[in-house]
Image (cartoon, rainbow, N blue to C red):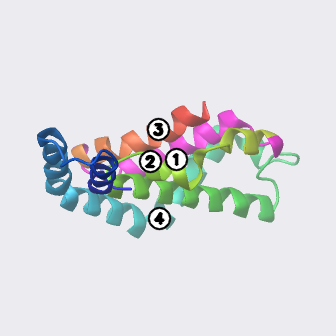
């Protein structure tokens, strides 16, 4: 949910007009809209490149994941791992577009650590995977855009830790 929706819902719940501070927040959100869309487009348009690079980086860091008995051993497990990379990249684009971490929480971080533990997927490895995704993604962005997108990757990492 965007800041605009949040402000409207909060003001309506409290039967009041938005405050000047809330209106300033909306103004700031709107003035950064073009940048947020540009970042999201870059990430979406380069998903395959980002995911491929992140996979290479992760499996170089953790070759044991691709070895027999590893969580990415075999084509099916590898494909599932790469699928998850794309899913997390998509979550980041949701956060960037909204200018808020809420869509990331609502779309799938609640219970993620427990899910990976139950599947016997090493959570530290998933954290490394998100770091690899971040590295691959920010390499395609300018400094300020990379800083903005990085906040959402970092949020996912902190939630998993």
Q: Which residue is mark 4?
A: 47
Q: Which residues are magenta?
A: 118-143
Spatial separation of the CA atoms under disc 4 and disc 2: 22 Å
Spatial separation of the CA atoms under disc 3 and disc 2: 11 Å
**Crowd class of label 1 (few under 14; some 14 to 19; many from 20; radius 10 Å):** some
The quarter of the picture where the C terminus appears is top right
SS class, disc 1: helix
Across and down, in percent, residue 64 comes to 77, 41
Q: What residue is rendered at 50% in x and 66% in y?
A: 48
Q: Is residue 56 above or below residue 161?
A: below
SS class, disc 2: helix
Residue 155's label in the rendered image is: 3
Across and down, in percent, residue 29 comes to 21, 51
Number of labels in the image equals: 4
Q: Quadrant of residue 121?
A: top right
Q: Which residue is mark 2?
A: 102
Q: Is residue 70 above or below residue 41?
A: above
Q: Nearer the viewer, mark 3 or mark 2?
A: 2
Residue 105's label in the rendered image is: 1
The quarter of the picture where the N terminus appears is bottom left
């Amino acid at each position: 949910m965007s800041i605009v929706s949040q402000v409207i819902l909060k003001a309506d719940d409290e039967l009041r007009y938005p405050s000047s501070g809330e209106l300033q927040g909306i103004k700031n959100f709107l003035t950064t809209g073009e940048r947020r869309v540009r970042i999201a487009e870059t990430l979406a348009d380069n998903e395959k490149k980002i995911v491929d690079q992140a996979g290479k980086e992760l499996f170089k860091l953790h070759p044991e994941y691709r070895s027999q008995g590893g969580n990415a051993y075999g084509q099916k497990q590898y494909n599932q791992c790469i699928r998850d990379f794309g899913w997390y990249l998509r979550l980041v684009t949701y956060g960037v577009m909204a200018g808020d971490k809420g869509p990331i929480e609502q779309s799938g971080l609640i219970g993620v650590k427990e899910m990976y533990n139950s599947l016997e997927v090493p959570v530290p490895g998933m954290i490394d995977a998100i770091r690899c995704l971040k590295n691959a993604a920010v390499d395609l962005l300018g400094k300020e855009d990379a800083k903005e997108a990085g906040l959402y990757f970092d949020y996912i990492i902190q939630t998993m830790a």
